[in-house]
Image (cartoon, rainbow, N blue to C red):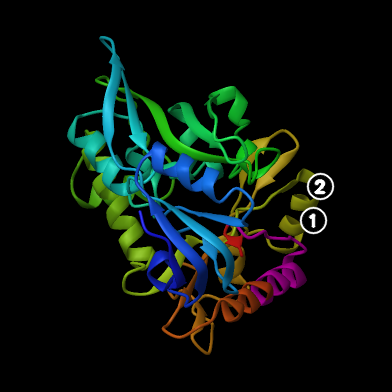
């Protein structure tokens, strides 16, 4: 465990933004994390996971602690379910594929989401009709100030749409070190009603899909829409899908009856941000090396040498253009640093 100074974070954020850390250290177990936090108690700290849900707009004048805890295991099972624990530093997609290889169902719709396991509860990540909260049991987290461990139950995490306690009252107070999921061993619930999964399965003449088939379909869809961060810098979906009041939706619908939408409650409607951005004429829009992806308007990309500020300026332009046309405010899902 070595602390390095003036460390480049270009390879530690999926946008591929060049930014420097004043100091940098990778920790590989709970004991190392406790030691770093204790020995650098008074220093400003920045916790780094997979670097997939952040936009660096400046150098980090702090000790950057990279959470690189690895390992996964079955901690309990019965006839129907298995409880699997993953360490925070495990790559999310690789973990999902591992569960599918064991025929454990529940995570397949969230295949190919970038990032590490430890950050998934923070955002309550989700895709194609599934969210972390659907299979989440608990997570262990370390109190940054005291180095004491705490187990957060599902209720204590206060999950919402791309929301959790870790973005609210527990923000910057805890570091998640491991997560436990409860997955099905058989009689899997196949969820293919969201997005293009049905069409992808039909294209491959699959009428009775397995969880592996669903995962493969999601991977194929995401590969056509979402660029590989190793080839084109991005952070996946940059914006949240806005949930608006019925009243506002009815005003929008009166002017734009073709607007895509999903009713989420008797008083609220979700409108896909990607649809709003695309139909505001911004799909494929580019300014310098910062751009809106040509295949998925929800994704902002770095074509090579964009700075974090370039990407941020583009995001603000997208937000203003959408609001001016539809009167709907879209929020960034990505954390701007």
Front residue of 297/149: it is: 149
Where is residue 216? Give x, y as percent.
24, 48
Label 2 secondary element: helix
Whole-percent x, y for residue 301 in the image: 47, 74
Residue at numbered disc 1 = 251
Mark 1: few/some/many CA within 10 Å (<14, 14-19, 20+): few
**In the rendered image, which residue does mark 2 sit on?**
247
Q: Is residue 298 left or right of residue 25?
A: right
Indicate yes or no whether the magenta region holds residue 168. Answer: no
Give percent across and percent down for residue 230. 32, 70
Dot 2, crowdedness within 10 Å: few (<14), some or many (≥20)? Answer: few
Answer whether residue 324 is magenta in the image: yes
Q: Which residues are magenta?
A: 317-333
Judge left or right: residue 293 versus residue 75.
right
Whether residue 39 is visible: yes
Q: Is residue 273 or residue 4 the one in the foreground?
A: 4
Describe the element under mark 1 as helix, strand or loop: helix
Q: Nearer the viewer, residue 196 or 115?
A: 115
Q: Residue furthest top?
A: 79
Q: Is residue 312 above or below residue 266?
A: below
Q: Which x, y percent locates residue 215? A: 28, 44
Q: Residue at x 47, y 30 (%)?
A: 139
- Asked whether disc 1 touches disc 2, contact meaning CB atoms under 8 Å apart, the reply is yes
């Amino acid at each position: 465990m070595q602390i390095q100074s003036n460390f480049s974070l270009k390879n530690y954020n999926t946008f591929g933004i060049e930014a420097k850390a004043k100091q940098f250290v990778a920790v590989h177990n709970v004991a190392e994390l406790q030691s770093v936090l204790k020995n650098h108690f008074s220093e400003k700290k920045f916790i780094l996971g997979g670097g997939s849900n952040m936009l660096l707009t400046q150098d980090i004048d702090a000790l950057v602690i990279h959470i690189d805890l690895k390992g996964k295991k079955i901690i309990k099972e019965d006839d129907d379910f298995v409880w699997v624990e993953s360490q925070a530093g495990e790559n999310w997609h690789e973990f999902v594929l591992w569960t599918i290889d064991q025929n454990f169902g529940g995570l397949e719709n969230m295949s190919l989401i970038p990032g590490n396991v430890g950050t998934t509860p923070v955002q309550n990540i989700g895709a194609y009709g599934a969210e972390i909260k659907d299979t989440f049991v608990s997570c262990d987290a370390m109190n940054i100030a005291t180095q004491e461990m705490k187990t957060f139950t599902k209720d204590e995490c206060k999950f919402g749409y791309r929301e959790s306690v870790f973005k609210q009252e527990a923000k910057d107070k805890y570091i998640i070190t491991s997560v436990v999921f409860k997955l099905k061993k058989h009689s899997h619930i196949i969820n293919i009603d969201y997005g293009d999964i049905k069409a992808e399965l039909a294209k491959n003449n699959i009428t009775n899909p397995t969880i592996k088939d669903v995962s493969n379909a999601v991977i194929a869809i995401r590969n056509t829409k979402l660029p590989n961060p190793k080839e084109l810098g991005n952070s996946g979906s940059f914006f949240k899908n806005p949930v608006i009041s019925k009243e506002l939706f009815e005003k929008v619908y009166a002017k734009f009856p073709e607007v895509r939408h999903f009713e989420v409650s008797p008083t609220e409607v979700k409108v896909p941000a990607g649809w709003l951005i695309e139909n505001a004429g911004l799909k494929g829009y580019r300014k310098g090396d910062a751009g809106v992806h040509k295949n998925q308007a929800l994704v902002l990309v770095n074509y090579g040498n964009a700075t974090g500020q370039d990407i941020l300026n583009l995001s603000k332009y997208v937000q203003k253009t959408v609001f001016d046309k539809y009167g709907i405010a879209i929020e960034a899902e990505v954390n701007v640093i």
